[in-house]
Image (spheres, rainbow, N blue to C red):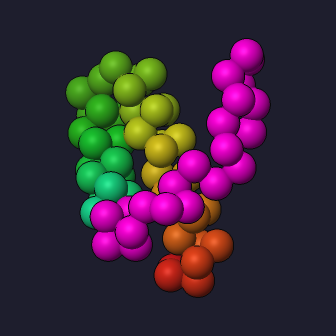
Amino acid sequence: MNVGNISRPERPHETTPTPILKGALARASQDAQRYAQTGPKAHEDVCHLLADEYLEELGERGEL
C-alpha cells in the first residue's frame, strides 16, 4: 500500500502476535464508536482504517 510518498509493507502487522492484534482491534472498534458519538470525524475514520488493517491481517491468518 502506498500513501502519497510513504511506502508501507504489504502486511505491516505480519509479525504482531495474534492476541495483541485482537486486543488492538477491540480497542480501535471501541474508539471508533466513541468518536462517532463525540467527534472529531477524522479520528473515527482513522480508527476504522486501523480496524480494517487488523481485520485483514487476522483474515490472512485464518483467525476470524
Q: Is residue 56 left or right of residue 25?
A: right
Q: Residue sitting at 31 percent across and 23 percent down?
A: 39
Q: Is residue 62 above or below residue 49?
A: below
Q: Position of residue 22 (x, y in %)?
A: 35, 67
Q: Is residue 30 above or below residue 21?
A: above
Picture quarter with the N terminus: top right
Residue 10 in view of the camera: yes
Q: Is residue 50 left or right of residue 10?
A: left
Is residue 37 shown in magenta?
Answer: no
Q: Position of residue 33 (x, y in %)?
A: 31, 45
Q: Position of residue 28 (x, y in %)?
A: 34, 48
Q: Is residue 29 above or below residue 1?
A: below
Q: Residue sitting at 27 percent across and 52 percent down?
A: 27
Q: Position of residue 54 (x, y in %)?
A: 49, 58
Taking depth in this image into account, of 3 and 45 the one nearest to the observer is 3
Is residue 8 shown in magenta?
Answer: yes
Q: Quadrant of residue 40?
A: top left
Q: Residue sitting at 53 percent across and 70 percent down?
A: 58
Q: Quadrant of residue 42?
A: top left
Q: Residue sitting at 40 percent across and 33 percent down?
A: 44
Q: What stretch of residues is rendered in magenta?
A: 1-22
Q: Is residue 49 left or right of residue 8?
A: left
Residue 33 in view of the camera: no
The total of numbered circles placed on residues is 0
Taking depth in this image into account, of 6 and 33 the one nearest to the observer is 6
